């Protein structure tokens, strides 16, 4: 039920008519992840909701420790002790990942939802050939495919990310950083998943390579029609190549908007502060930061987690936690400022 | 891997062997003991009388063995002998040659020590890798770590404890020797089983003695490798636990262990002397031990030379095999 309202809301927000007809490939509902440490329970994800359509690209931004990577891991069901997924659903296509057996989950990884790692530098096994690392991924997911065909498909995947077929026989140490990242993308698209999560895929690369890698991701993503979640800090990169931006703060998604809306009219005070902090061409000189520090997940402030740093703080922000709400136009914000507006919208 | 590199390694091997044999040549000569005199003194003691011309006999034998020449002359004769593959004769067991002694004792040592060293390496590394692997059941972990405790027990004590409890109290294994007294060596199943049965306790002593070290170092390596990005990424790829364990985790954690294996081969000799003496096995260790006691230096030279050659050659083989295990290493 919530899914349909969300879908309707996102539809309205999307300017491209073609995209609105595409099916929903990812629905995350009320996802809760906690880490149980000696110092107590840290809520790393707190009722996160997210919907993605086929071909949609969303950027996930937020400070370190805001839960971006935890969200990626939770969607892959790779949260390890002392962490635990405590509630929520992740539906990819028509498969509810949380209800799968461990064995079926292994099958779902890469074939339904793929992950492009953060540290591509060290993400490839140093002692086996690149080719065998593509082939073993295929082997784990497909039966009755001959060795020759797997090799052909692996080489095709390498070529689709603009790598030479010779890379198949090479080792990780013989490749440059950008090439390694491409290999990881090739592995990610090998089984044409519905959702691709790229966790800071360009953070270790120089700007030129960054751009090439992003172009590759975009091109490939269009080819196979997958939805992409790009995790990162780089707002410029998000603006260039994403459709939507989701802002995380202290384990919650505080705002989900289209790129244009986010950069011209951010709603949540935290997003506003983020956008203000970006350097502008017109006004050289002073940068505006966000005062204060990100809160510890072990001791979140009462009420809204952002209220100690918020410039629009109101009295009930300090006591009541704001709920995630859909604004007119389909934007989602978690802030008391828009409570009235939301009531009107629902009415 | 170039021929030039192999050539260099072989040259290096000769240097090592030369250095080792030079050191072993001079060390026994630092003492003023004369093995020939000692041997005849012992014969005289056993026979109950000393022949009148004992001094002349000793001098004659010393001349026959070349012991009357200046030390440096003897040294060069010795090196020349090695070049001719002539290791000389045993002073104590004359007319047996050193080569004969080696030939008789080597199969025992190789059979027991090489097999146990390899077994300890394989079992120890597997247990160590398992004990660092998160999905391993706790009982395997406990089992693996218990061997680390055994590591603290000196091999001598371990051997004696095994003899006492398993051999003497429980009577599950023979106390020593190579095969049951009264059996005739032959090529039959029952004789081979008898042989293996006698090797059981020494083998256990050797395996238990070194297992803990492998478990400990492999566990440490395993913990490191487990945190590597490529292991996590392998999980993201949806690979099965078995594939990740074998191809991503074990394969990488094993690399430094192979170097450790080459180094452990040197210890084989020390273990041989201890274990073979305790269990009364006629291996190289026992022969070397007897030779040291009677200052039979030609035998000491021969065995040490042989062991140095063996270990150095194995090291080179391991080194040459290394690029096959780790593609990042290339010999140029």
Image (spheres, coloured by chain):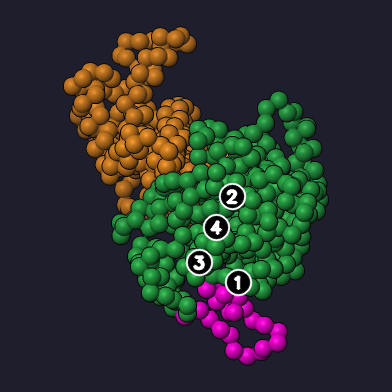
Residue B97 located left or right of residue B243:
left
Measure the alpha-carbon separation of dots 2 and 4. 14 Å
Label located before the other in sequence (2 or 1): 2
Q: The orange chain is which one?
A: B
Q: What element carries label 1?
A: loop
Q: What element carries label 3?
A: helix
Q: Mark 1 points at which residue?
A: A266
Task: Name the chief secondary structure element in magenta.
Answer: loop
Residue A182 located left or right of residue B69:
right
Q: Residues within 10 Å of mark 3 (few under 14, many from 20)?
A: few
Q: Which of A197 and A324 is in front in this view?
A: A324
Q: What stretch is highlighted in magenta?
A: A269-291
Q: Residue B194 carries which label?
A: none
Measure the alpha-carbon separation of dots 3 and 1. 17 Å
Which chain is disc 4 placed on? A
User: What's the colour of chain A in the image?
Assistant: green
Label located before the other in sequence (3 or 1): 1
Q: Mark 3 points at which residue?
A: A340
Label located before the other in sequence (2 or 4): 2
Which chain is disc 3 placed on? A
Label located before the other in sequence (4 or 3): 3
Q: Which of B95 and B68 is in front in this view?
A: B95
Q: Name the residue under label 4.
A: A347
x and y percentages locating residue A171 in the rendered image: 69, 49
Measure the alpha-carbon separation of dots 2 and 1. 22 Å
Which chain is disc 1 placed on? A
Q: Residues within 10 Å of mark 4 (few under 14, many from 20)?
A: few
């Amino acid at each position: 039920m919530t899914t349909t309202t969300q879908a309707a809301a996102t539809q309205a927000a999307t300017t491209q008519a073609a995209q609105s007809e595409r099916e929903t490939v990812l629905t995350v509902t009320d996802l809760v992840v906690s880490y149980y440490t000696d110092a107590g329970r840290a809520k790393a994800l707190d009722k996160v909701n997210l919907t993605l359509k086929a071909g949609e690209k969303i950027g996930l931004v937020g400070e370190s420790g805001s839960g971006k990577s935890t969200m990626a891991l939770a969607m892959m069901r790779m949260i390890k002790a002392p962490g635990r997924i405590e509630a929520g659903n992740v539906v990819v296509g028509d498969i509810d990942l949380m209800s799968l057996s461990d064995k079926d989950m292994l099958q779902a990884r890469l074939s339904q939802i793929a992950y492009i790692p953060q540290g591509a530098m060290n993400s490839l096994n140093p002692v086996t050939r690149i080719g065998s690392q593509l082939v073993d991924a295929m082997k784990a997911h497909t039966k009755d495919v001959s060795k020759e065909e797997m090799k052909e498909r692996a080489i095709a995947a390498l070529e689709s990310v603009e790598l030479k077929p010779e890379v198949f026989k090479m080792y990780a140490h013989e490749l440059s950083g950008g090439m390694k990242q491409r290999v990881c993308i090739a592995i990610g698209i090998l089984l044409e998943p519905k959702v691709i999560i790229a966790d800071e895929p360009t953070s270790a690369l120089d700007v030129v390579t960054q751009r090439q890698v992003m172009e590759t991701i975009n091109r490939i993503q269009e080819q196979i029609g997958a939805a992409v979640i790009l995790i990162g800090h780089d707002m410029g990169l998000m603006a260039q190549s994403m459709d939507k931006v989701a802002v995380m703060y202290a384990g919650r998604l505080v705002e989900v908007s289209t790129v244009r809306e986010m950069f011209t009219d951010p709603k949540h005070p935290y997003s506003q502060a983020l956008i203000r902090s970006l350097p502008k061409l017109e006004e050289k000189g002073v940068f505006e930061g966000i005062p204060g520090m990100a809160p510890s997940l072990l001791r979140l402030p009462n009420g809204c987690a952002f209220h100690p740093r918020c410039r629009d703080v109101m009295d009930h922000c300090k006591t009541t936690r704001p709920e995630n709400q859909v604004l007119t136009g389909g934007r989602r914000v978690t802030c008391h400022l828009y409570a009235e507006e939301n009531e009107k919208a629902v009415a | 891997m170039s021929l030039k590199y192999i050539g260099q390694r072989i040259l290096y091997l000769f240097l090592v062997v030369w250095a080792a044999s030079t050191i072993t040549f001079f060390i026994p000569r630092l003492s003023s003991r004369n093995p020939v005199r000692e041997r005849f003194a012992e014969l005289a003691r056993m026979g109950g009388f000393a022949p009148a011309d004992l001094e002349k006999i000793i001098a004659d034998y010393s001349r026959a063995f070349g012991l009357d020449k200046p030390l440096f002359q003897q040294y060069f004769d010795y090196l020349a002998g090695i070049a001719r593959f002539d290791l000389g004769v045993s002073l104590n067991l004359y007319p047996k040659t050193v080569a004969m002694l080696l030939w008789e004792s080597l199969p025992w040592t190789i059979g027991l020590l090489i097999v146990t060293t390899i077994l300890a390496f394989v079992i120890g590394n597997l247990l160590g890798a398992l004990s660092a692997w998160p999905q391993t059941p706790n009982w395997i972990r406990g089992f693996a770590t218990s061997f680390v405790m055994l590591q603290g027990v000196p091999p001598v004590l371990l051997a004696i404890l095994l003899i006492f409890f398993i051999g003497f109290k429980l009577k599950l294994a023979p106390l020593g020797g190579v095969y049951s007294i009264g059996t005739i060596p032959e090529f039959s199943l029952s004789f081979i089983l008898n042989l293996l049965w006698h090797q059981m306790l020494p083998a256990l002593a050797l395996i238990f003695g070194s297992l803990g070290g492998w478990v400990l170092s492999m566990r440490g390596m395993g913990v490191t490798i487990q945190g590597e990005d490529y292991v996590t990424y392998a999980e993201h790829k949806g690979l099965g636990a078995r594939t990740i364990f074998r191809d991503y985790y074990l394969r990488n954690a094993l690399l430094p262990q192979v170097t450790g294996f080459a180094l452990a081969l040197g210890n084989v000799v020390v273990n041989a002397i201890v274990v073979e003496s305790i269990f009364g096995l006629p291996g190289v260790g026992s022969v070397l031990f007897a030779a040291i006691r009677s200052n039979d230096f030609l035998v000491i030279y021969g065995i040490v030379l042989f062991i140095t050659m063996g270990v150095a050659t194995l090291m080179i083989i391991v080194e040459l095999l290394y690029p096959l295990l780790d593609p990042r290493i290339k010999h140029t």
